[in-house]
Amino acid sequence: MKEIVSSFVDKWQGKADIDDDDFWGECINTYRSIEQYRLTLPWADVPETRAQAMDFLHCPLPCGDCCRFGLEAITYEDAQRIVSTGLSWKEFGQICTLLQHKGKDMTWAIKGTPCPFLEDNLCSIYDHRPQVCRDYPIIRPTLVGDSNRLAISIRCDPGAGIAREMIRLHLMMAGGRLTPNLMVCGDKL
Ligand code: SF4
Ligand code: SF4
């Protein structure tokens, strides 16, 4: 895996350009081949930046593929919201696996894919869906472990599109140049 990335980086060293579709296409394919399908970008993960990033999300409808990727990181608050739709905790336990439990600090994952709440390609608990679904394709900082970097899932093209537009915005605002590992360097570097 590391070899694939390093040959990509070597190929585009000094000529990475966010407006070059060949670079971007190869870039996304390369980084998608990395297990976690995510890019971390040079933006702090704060509400304003998240809102800005979500403005760049244009999902084709109906898609719903993110409901087929496997759902993790359901919190206690999420679980309460889901149960309030009329599910019993027993039924919730039949759908979700408890991953972590420390007092009310609990995390569940949906068992299997697609998500059992997906019906006719629509979320049947839309108003009560977990936060992680509301945020997607932005990934919660606690799942990435670095709140100074905005993490985006690039599994789908619209998610990758957010990453591209946020990097473009960063280059416009802060200047500098892009490196193939999607870092932005000052001109002197
Ligand atoms: S975020 Fe991506 S996977 Fe989810 S609905 Fe939009 S296009 Fe589909
Ligand atoms: S809860 Fe709803 S939005 Fe979230 S994965 Fe399931 S169907 Fe999709």
Image (spheres, rainbow, N blue to C red):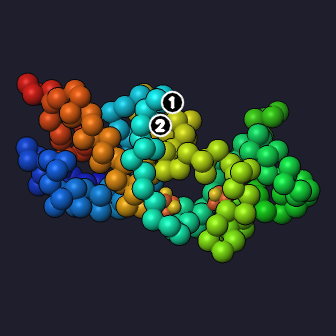
Q: Residue at x 60, y 48 (%)?
A: 134
Apparent side of residue 23 relative to residue 51 in the rendered image (left or right): left
| Image x and y of residue 125, in percent | 74, 58
Q: CA distance from mark 2 to mark 1?
A: 6 Å
Horizontal and vertical percent position of residue 95: 79, 63
Quarter of the figure with the N terminus: bottom left
Q: Nearer the viewer, residue 74 or 157?
A: 157
- Left or right: where does residue 88 sit relative to residue 147? right
Residue matched to label 2 = 51
**Residue 99 visible in the snapshot:** no
Which residue type carries mark 1? Pro
Circle 1 crowding by C-alpha within 10 Å: few under 14, some 14–19, many from 20: few
Residue 66 visible in the snapshot: yes
Residue 141, percent across and down? 52, 35
Circle 2 sits in a helix, a strand or a loop, which is it? Answer: helix
Nearest to the observer: residue 131 or residue 59: 59
Identify the residue at horizontal 9%, vertical 28% (top origin).
187
Query: Disc number at residue 47?
Result: 1
Q: Is residue 93 left or right of residue 176?
A: right
At x 70%, y 59%, the residue is 110
Residue kind at label 2, given as amino acid type: Ala
Q: Residue at x 88, y 58 (%)?
A: 87
Location of ligand 2 given as a quarter of the image: bottom right
